[in-house]
Amino acid sequence: MGDDDFEPNASSPTDHILTALQLYGYRPFADEPDARPLPEGDEVAGAISEIFGALIGALQDTRLEPDLGDLLWSTVNLFHRATGRIERELDDNEQAQRRSQREQDGGEIKSVELERLIAEGQTLIERQNAFELMRDQAADYYERHTGSPWRPRSGSMVNHKAMTSAMIDSREFLSAKRRASQEVLLPPGPKIAFTGGLDFNDHTLIWAQLDKVHAKHPDMVLLHGKSPRGAELIASRWADHRKVPQIGFSPDWTKHAKAAPFKRNDAMLDVLPIGVIVFPGTGIQDNLADKAKRLGIPVFDFRAK
C-alpha cells in the first residue's frame, strides 16, 4: 500500500463503538436486558408539571384558550397510549414465554432464551408501572385545571400493581401477571351496584346515601352504568372525590342494539354485588332492581312508591 492510500483518520470498529457511547450513552441491543435505571419519581413529577405549566401559561388568556382543554386531555392520553402499547408487548411476551416453555429440551440454549424472555417481561412491567404513574400525575394536573376527572375516550383506565421481583420461574411470572390483571379489572372489596336515570340530578341525596354505604363498607367498589349525565355521572364523581374504585359498565349498542342496557344490567349482576342502589329513572332501572331481587341481592330503593 502506497503512502497515498494511508488514511490516518480512518475509524476502527472499536472507535465507532466508543464514539457512539460518548454521543448517545449505553444502549442495549433488542435482545439484551436493559440495565439502565428508571427515571426518579421526583424528576418525572417535575417534568410533567413543567409540561402542563408551559401549555397553560402559553395559551391561557389568548385566542387559543378554548383549545386548551383538548390539548391537556391529549397530553394525558400520550401516557395512556404508552401504557396500552406496553400492555400489548406484555401480551406478546407472554405468548413467547409459553412457546419457550413448550420447547424446553434441557439444553442451555433454550433455557437461556426463556430466562431472557422472563427478564424482558419484568422490564416491561416496570415500564408499564412507570408510564401509569406518569399518566396518573398528568391526569391530576388535568383535573386541577379543568375541574373534571380525566377519562379515556374508550376502554378502561387501570393502574397495575407492581409485581414482585422474586419471580424466577416463567409459570409463576405468567400466573402473577394474570392475577394482577384480574385484580386491576375487578378490584377486591365488596361490590355495590348503582343505577339511576339521566334526568335525576339530586346530588345531595345521592352523595348522602353513598356516604352511608361507604361508612359501612370502606373498601367498597362502585359499579354503575357509565351514563354521560344524571344520577350515574353524579355517583361516578362521588367515587372520584372519595377515592373509591369504580367500574363503569357501558351498554354495547353495536352488539345488542335495543337490548344493550338490559344486557349491561346482567353483566353488572354477574359480578355479584352485595347490594344495589336504585334511584328514579326508566324501565332500565326497574329491570336491574327486579333482577337483583330475584337473585336475592338487597335493593336500596329510592324510587317514588
Image (cartoon, rainbow, N blue to C red):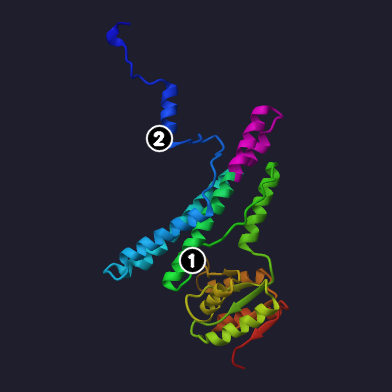
Q: Residues within 10 Å of mark 2 (few under 14, many from 20)?
A: few
Drawn side of residue 234 relative to residue 61, left or right: right
Residue at the spot 42% in from the left edge and 36% down from the top edge:
24
Give the x, y percent position of residue 9.
Answer: 33, 19
State which region is magenta: 95-122
**Residue pointed to by mark 1:** 140
193 drawn magenta: no
- Against 294, residue 153 (above or below) is above
**Number of numbered labels in the structure image:** 2
Q: Nearer the viewer, mark 1 or mark 2?
A: 2
Is any atom of residue 151 visible in this view? no
Which one is nearer the viewer's eye here, 129 or 38? 38
Give the x, y percent position of residue 240.
Answer: 55, 72
Residue at the spot 53% in from the left edge and 73% down from the top edge:
226
**Residue pointed to by mark 2:** 23
Residue at the spot 60% in from the left edge and 71% down from the top edge:
244
Which one is nearer the viewer's eye here, 13 or 201? 13
